[in-house]
Image (cartoon, helix red, strand yellow):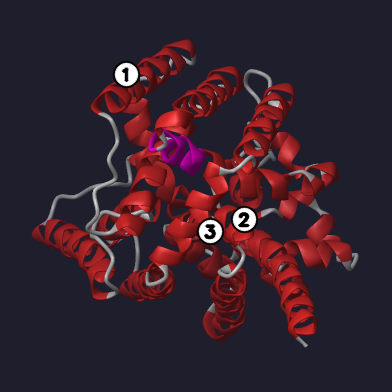
Amino acid sequence: MKDLLALLVFDSVFSWLAIVATLIAIILIPKIFGVSWINGLLFAQATLFFTSLTTIAGLSTGGISERHGIHFFCIEFVFYIAMYAIYGSMLKKSANILRALSQFYDGNTAYFLIFLSIVLAVFNYVNHADEGTSRIAYMASSWFSFVKPFIQVFAPASSLGVLILFLRPKRRILAYILLSISILANVLTGSKASFATSLLTSFLVLRDLAGNNKLGFRQTDIKLVICLTLVSVFFVLARLDVTLSDLLDRFLLSGEANLLTYFSDDPTAACENVTMFAKMHRGWARLAGDPTANDIDTLFGYALMIKAVGINAFTGPNARLSAYALCNFPGTNLLFLSIVVSAYFFLVASVFRKFLAYPIIISLVYPYLVSSLSSSAQDFNLIMQDISYLFVFQFIGLFLLTRKAQFHG
């Protein structure tokens, strides 16, 4: 990893001007769609910035060609613009969403969410990786496909629920219970600070919904939450023997996949033995019996590491959108990537519209949709996965609309 970081050299006027220009673009694009420059998609903003550093460094040192530099910025920023177009359109219905969230967390369904959060925390602890092994090893198992949808939907709702319950004077105890579950799960599973970043992004999501209205958190609660969070984060970092420098390296290596592809003499080498079907949607290809989709060595991150070190260490970088595109969809094959991405954005917008009239469902689905948008560019596998989930939501929405039409008929 240190060898990869050694590629990040910024020793020219061009590199620093490019960094400033990239940062300005990341800040200004949300404003075009009526979204605050710091918002609920902060994770997407941060990973785009740090991943851009790898390309800028490559262009500055000659490690990346101008053609590949244009490829990176076009793919990443077209996706970024589309992402904020969707997010901004959803925020136009913020009054409906806030009303639904109030109804959800003021009712007994909040207890059900707490119960599920406890179950998921125990599940993650039981299945967490042993020391020295990949933390996502068990996630590649077929049985995990039946569990992951619940994690993907209920985890963002739990983080958002912590903050909403803090705004209910009679439900602060429930808020602290949910917060305690998040902290305990983080400590037990060895995750560095996932719950802390989830709380931060959930706060920004809630602030985006509130707009100019103040959220009204008690100062005592804010201080206590910050204190508990910081103590827990430092405890976990000390327990895992992780330094602040290691965390900075981790941020910079959000572009690790790009370093392994854009700096490569043959960016497509790791993806040669995969069918187009599997490249577009690995899960569906696997169900269809595609042998390349069933071969775990062809999983993008694993395949990159096999090319880099010669063996499958069952760990590897996320399938960053631009890196995945360069490796899997060279030249005119980029059309196939655009089909998948367009389908993803269409389904996100469609599912949101269909469930907006159902308070309980939208209260769970909205945090999931925002979480999906925020993480999608960082891992194309998540886009493929979420397309599957969104198709299921789409059919549920159509069923509810049909039942509603029959009732009124």
Image coordinates of residue 390 in percent, x first then y, are 67, 66
Label 1 environment density (alpha carbons within 10 Å; few <14, some 14–19, many ≥20): few
* Mark 1 residue type: Cys
Q: In this view, does 370 lie above or below 79?
A: above
SS state under label 2: helix
Q: Nearer the viewer, mark 2 or mark 3?
A: 2
User: Is there a contact, CB below 8 Å, between mark 1 and mark 3?
Assistant: no
- The secondary structure making up most of the magenta span is helix
Q: Name the residue under label 2.
A: 360
Magenta stretch, residue numbers: 159-167
The residues tagged by marks 2 and 1 sit, at their Cα atoms, a distance apart of 32 Å
Mark 2 → mark 3, Cα distance in angstroms: 10 Å
Q: In this view, does 352 lie above or below 233?
A: below
Q: Residue 97: x, y in percent?
A: 47, 61
Left or right of 203? Residue 179 is: right
The amino acid pointed to by label 2 is Ile
Tell me if 179 is positioned left or right of 61 in this view: right
Q: Residue 118 carries which label?
A: none
Q: Mark 3 points at which residue?
A: 366
The residue under label 3 is which amino acid type? Tyr
The residue that appears at 63% across and 18% down in the rendered structure is 131
Quadrant housing residue 73: bottom left
Q: Is residue 162 magenta?
A: yes
| Quarter containing the N terminus | top left
Q: In the image as oriented, which residue stretches furthest toward the right?
A: 289
Q: Earlier in the sequence, mark 2 or mark 3?
A: 2
Q: Image quadrant of residue 241?
A: top left
Residue drawn 64% across and 61% down?
A: 386
At 56% across and 70% down in the image, what residue appears? 348
N-terminal of the pair, mark 1 or mark 3, is 1
Q: Which mark is residue 227?
A: 1
